[in-house]
Amino acid sequence: MDLEFSGPHSGPMETFETLVRAEFAPRNTYLNTASTGLLPARSVTALRTAVESAAVGRPTDMFADVEEARAAFARLVGVPAGRVAAGASVAVYSGLIAASLPEGAEVVLPEGDFSSLVNPFHLRRDLKVRAVPLERLAESVRPGTALVAVSAAQSADGRVADLPALRAAARAHGARTFVDASQAAGWLDLDADTDDYTACVGFKWLLCPRGVAFLVVPEDLGGLTPLFAGWVAGERPWDACYGPIEELARSARRFDESPALFSYAAAHHSLALLEELGVDAVRAHDLALAGRFREGLAALGHEPVPAPGSPIVSVPGLGHRQGELSRAGVEVSDRAGHLRAAFHLYNTAADVDRLLDVLTG
């Protein structure tokens, strides 16, 4: 696919393909973004520069990189930067939200969603946690439900949640919504302004190193207490290094974890690339490849888990082929006996055909 676009850091009408090929040169058929995304060349360069500078005692200002990354993620999901906290994992932010709920509060979750999202709620033994099928999530919200949490796209099989229906149900019953966008941000058009909380790791579809994650909170900060607040959570961090913090940040930065600075030195370059390409173009590219794979599977007599509109394709009964595929230079995942392939911006039609060829044997 050769989509034309122009971006803030590109020449006029530079093509999607040209920019992607300048940033990525995988040496195998890499179809495993749902596990870990590839780093763009610009991010590798930034990370190397930061490490080498620190090694000789001339470190770069990586706290500025955190702010650049925060602002870029905010633009990607449609909220002001002041509503975005920067951290390292979804589990920490799920724990923060779980800790905010009163004793006896009801939380509705999908069955089999990713552990980092759901486990903190189950560990609050004084909460009423209900797990229901993803397709019944919206209808399961009822009077008295305090929170409904879901991954925008399921890690195991790529199914995309009906977020508009979920939001409508939550509003009707006074519940808050919490969306894990880790398998969606970067290809799915997200509007985090319509949810109470959105969390996301950066090392998958956002092409960042591990150690980068974000949390979006409401303008009123969502009733959360910054239980793990360290010095970076102060309104003036460098004045908050000793003793109790006199004034917490007035923005979502009060929920920052002490950042993995080297990861953020690369992250803001990865996010800039996605902004240059445009999420719409990335989604069209990714879904076209997933559609090609689904068509090829049908010709081979295999039926994937239905997941319309998703670049993640999960094929029941083929997970045992993962090792064979890896030996053939094709990287996919085995998830609960399913073969999971994930198609992202650096993949091509040739990658799809190579996967199908190896599966054909």
Image: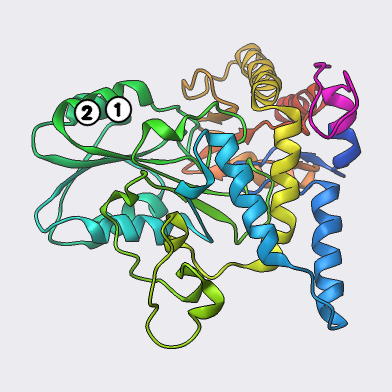
Task: Please give the label number shown on residue 69.
Answer: none
Q: Which residues are magenta?
A: 1-19
Q: Is residue 219 left or right of residue 204?
A: left
| Residue bearing mark 1 | 167
At numbered mark 2, what does the secondary structure look like: helix, strand or loop?
A: helix
Task: Please give the label number shown on residue 171.
Answer: 2
Decide whether residue 18 is among the magenta residues. Answer: yes
Q: Is residue 224 left or right of residue 38?
A: left
Depth order, front residue of 342/234: 234
Q: Quadrant of the C terminus?
A: top right
Q: Is residue 80 left or right of residue 50?
A: left
At numbered mark 1, what does the secondary structure look like: helix, strand or loop?
A: helix
Please give the name of the residue rendered at 18% of the width and 29% of the height, measured from the top-left corner.
140
Q: Are marks 1 and 2 in contact (CB under 8 Å)?
A: yes
Please give the name of the residue rendered at 30% of the width and 55% of the height, measured from the top-left corner.
97
Q: Is residue 333 above or below residue 211?
A: above
